[in-house]
Amino acid sequence: GAVVSQHPSRVICKSGTSVKIECRSLDFQATTMFWYRQFPKQSLMLMATSNEGSKATYEQGVEKDKFLINHASLTLSTLTVTSAHPEDSSFYICSARGTSGFNEQYFGPGTRLTVT
Amino acid sequence: GDSVTQMEGPVTLSEEAFLTINCTYTATGYPSLFWYVQYPGEGLQLLLKATKADDKGSNKGFEATYRKETTSFHLEKGSVQVSDSAVYFCAGGSNYKLTFGKGTLLTVNP
């Protein structure tokens, strides 16, 4: 149980284009989903927290107009990187928290974004 | 704000050696504490957790005890295997938000 999937697992896009990453909770309802960014050999940096049906809360320094987050249902959240640039290349990981289990997050496998 | 400090790697061990990865935390209040493992090219998997002082989390031979007096949550395993090679992250959380350490790369050689 508690499986989170991400799609795509890898994506390459050209500079200036937008790319959407999906995060799905497959066997539970996720009231809260989190989006992280991980640079090579570094820890996870929380980008934003999204609750179903409401606007995402972005961490300080994260551009909300560049990283659009939509949590339209209890099983799906999407992250859209708009007008991507090479510096946006990174490993993006989502996690989902269900209605039970104090503070426990279940992580997706990650999406490797490369902007050329 | 909350912070988690863990032992910097990389750590290289021979199979069946004893493993310790140190982790200390700074937080207001008493966060839940976690160890996550990340295998190459994959996302994070929860390894073990502890939600209050003196709790011991354990899984797959790994253990960690929540020490309030030293604000620590050190990860230990008595006999590592090659398959344990991965990056290990210590994390602490309260109010539904996790703070991660920088990760420790463990390589176990046969």
Image (tube, coloured by chain):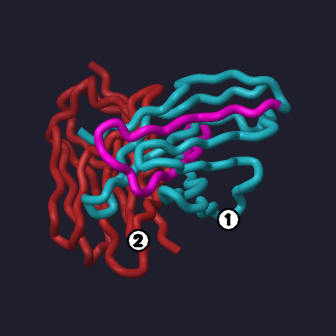
Chain colours: A cyan, B red
Residue B104: give x, y in percent of width and height.
Answer: 43, 43
- Amino acid under label 1? Gln
Label 2 SS:
loop
Q: Residue at x 55, y 31 (%)?
A: A111
To which residue does mark 1 refer? A60
- Mark 2 and mark 1, same subunit? no
Q: Residues within 10 Å of mark 2 (few under 14, many from 20)?
A: few
Q: CA distance from mark 2 to mark 1?
A: 17 Å
A32 part of magenta stretch: yes
Residue A101: give x, y in percent of width and height.
Answer: 25, 59
Picture quadrant of residue B23: bottom left
Residue B80: give x, y in percent of width and height.
Answer: 21, 33
> In which quadrant will I find the N terminus of chain A?
top left
Q: Is residue B95 above or below residue A45?
A: below
Q: Residue at x 85, y 32 (%)?
A: A16
Chain part drawn in magenta: A17-42
Horizontal relation, residue B103 to residue A100: left or right = right
To which residue does mark 2 refer? B95
